[in-house]
Image: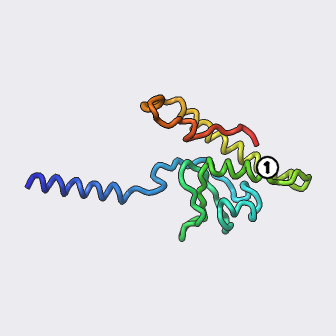
Amino acid sequence: MKAYLCLTLFTCCSLLFLSSCSDTMNAIPGPPFAYEDFGTEPIASRLLGPKGKDTQVIARFGTTKKTPPAEGPDIRYVNMEQSMFFLRRVVRDLPKTPENAALRQRLSKTYSRLYWSYSSRRNSFMASPSASYGRGGMNRAFMMPPMPPAI
């Protein structure tokens, strides 16, 4: 009887824990951005999906969500590392013309804001001791690769 009670209690606690897990559980939000900070709509829609009314973008160390919530404000969540790679690729592919100078400047500013959050998190991650480093464990630099400070 006591074993049955313990098993039931353990099962209930496990179900409660698993039901409370989500993709945003460990996602620490970063700085908020406007949709236009990632380029014009044809460019930014590849990363963020179609623009809605008053779309806010939040960079975080979690998954990317292109679809806005059914109710409430239009907030898109974007992975910080993925958005930094995206911005570097967009700036590299933009033709170097005077018409694109303002867009290039805005994308560079967005990248520098993302870089500050990413580098502080990466430095903290790299500074903490690892139990498996050097014993066949994965190199931490591969988990959070270094990024250039500017585009």
Q: Quadrant of the C terminus?
A: top right
Is 121 situated left or right of 100 in this image? Answer: left
Mark 1 surroundings: few (<14), some (14-19) or many (≥20) residues within 10 A: few
Image quadrant in which you'd find residue 38: bottom right
Position of residue 128 measured from the top left corner of the image (x, y, whole percent): 49, 30
**Which is nearer the eye, 62 or 106?**
62
Residue linked to disc 1: 92
Direction bottom: furthest residue: 70
Position of residue 149 measured from the top left corner of the image (x, y, whole percent): 71, 37
For image coordinates 18% across by 54% down, the residue present is 7
Q: Quadrant of the N terminus?
A: bottom left
Tag 1: residue type? Arg
**In this rendering, is residue 69 above or below 61?**
below
For image coordinates 71% across by 46% down, the residue present is 111
Position of residue 54 measured from the top left corner of the image (x, y, whole percent): 67, 64
**In this rendering, is residue 13 above or below 114?**
below
Position of residue 52 measured from the top left corner of the image (x, y, whole percent): 66, 68
**In this rendering, is residue 58 above or below 148?**
below
For image coordinates 38% across by 57% down, the residue present is 20
